[in-house]
């Protein structure tokens, strides 16, 4: 799909992978809507790329619908590109030593990471379906979701996170098959260990230990590398229904 003047909506774009993706697509010529729960962070990114910002809770259907409405009002049409980067990371054992079962945390993680992805995908697909096709293939749009290598390599304490990302990965193929008749592609990126807000606060020793476990290159991934893959997915029409590991060959150990 050609990026020039194409409308893109990125969730979780106030920082990290989402912000890098917003910048990458804007640099390619897209008109970008930056969505984040933190409206000030979304506005800062949007200002820097000439886009628009909207506050949205991806786990709330009404909030997501309102955000799509705002994007359509601002740009005059629905987005053809949707990238789901919003998510949370949680760490809790199934049976903690204090005996308090973290069931609420499990539910919240699934609500944000899995249900939130599904809600945004659903609203995005519904609006894309009403758009005219843009090429001889009959393309209308593309949705890029974000899983994690934890969906296959979940560590101790990652039951909620791995389950939520496993759901995102499993959603990919049936969504792509269903939406194919409408010319809408669905692809998921499963990042490995990346420079994000979750890793930024780690001590240097911990970061060095993490990097040493990554085969090559032996470092944390840059958000711009995720963004480059997201852009390639948008531009390469043959990418559809796949989960792509972006991980420098890392395989997470049990702990």
Image (tube, grey):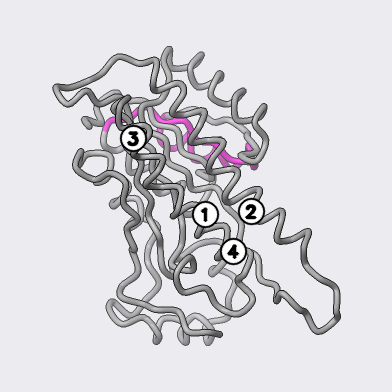
Mark nearer the N terminus (2 vs 1): 2
Residue drawn where x is 40% and y is 72% of the image = 220
Q: Secondary structure at mark 1?
A: helix
Q: Which residues are magenta?
A: 29-50
Q: Secondary structure at mark 3?
A: strand
* Label ID, residue 161: 4
Mark nearer the N terminus (1 vs 3): 3
- Residue that numbered label 1 is attached to: 167
Q: How many marks?
A: 4
Q: Position of residue 145 (x, y in %)?
A: 43, 47
Mark nearer the N terminus (4 vs 2): 2
Residue drawn where x is 17% and y is 26% of the image = 137
**251 displayed left or right of 255:** left
Residue drawn where x is 50% and y is 62% of the image = 196
Quarter of the rendering occupied by the N terminus: top left
Q: Pointers 1 and 3 in contact (CB under 8 A)?
A: no
Q: Position of residue 161 (x, y in %)?
A: 59, 63
Residue 53 sits above or below residue 234 on the image: above
How would you rate the neighbour count of disc 3 (Cα within 10 Å): few for under 14, some for 14-19, many for 20 or more? Answer: many
């Amino acid at each position: 799909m050609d990026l020039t003047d194409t409308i893109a909506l990125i969730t979780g774009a106030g920082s990290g992978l989402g912000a890098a993706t917003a910048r990458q697509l804007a640099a390619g010529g897209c008109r970008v809507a930056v969505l984040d729960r933190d409206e000030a962070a979304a506005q800062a990114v949007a200002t820097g790329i000439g886009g628009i910002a909207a506050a949205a809770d991806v786990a709330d259907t009404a909030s997501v619908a309102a955000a799509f409405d705002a994007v359509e009002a601002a740009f005059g049409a629905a987005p053809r590109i949707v990238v789901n980067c919003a998510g949370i990371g949680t760490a809790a054992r199934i049976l903690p030593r204090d005996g308090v079962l973290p069931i609420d945390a499990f539910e919240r993680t699934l609500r944000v990471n899995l249900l939130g992805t599904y809600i945004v995908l659903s609203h995005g697909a519904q609006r894309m379906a009403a758009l005219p096709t843009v090429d001889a293939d009959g393309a209308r749009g593309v949705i890029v979701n974000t899983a994690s290598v934890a969906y296959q390599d979940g560590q101790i304490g990652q039951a909620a996170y791995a389950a939520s990302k496993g759901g995102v990965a499993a959603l990919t193929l049936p969504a792509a098959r269903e939406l194919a008749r409408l010319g809408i592609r669905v692809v998921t990126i499963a990042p490995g260990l990346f420079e994000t807000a979750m890793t930024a606060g780690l001590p240097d020793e911990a970061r060095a230990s993490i990097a040493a476990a990554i085969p090559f290159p032996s470092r944390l991934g840059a958000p711009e590398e995720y963004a480059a893959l997201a852009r390639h997915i948008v531009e390469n029409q043959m990418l559809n229904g796949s989960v792509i590991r972006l991980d420098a060959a890392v395989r997470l150990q049990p702990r």
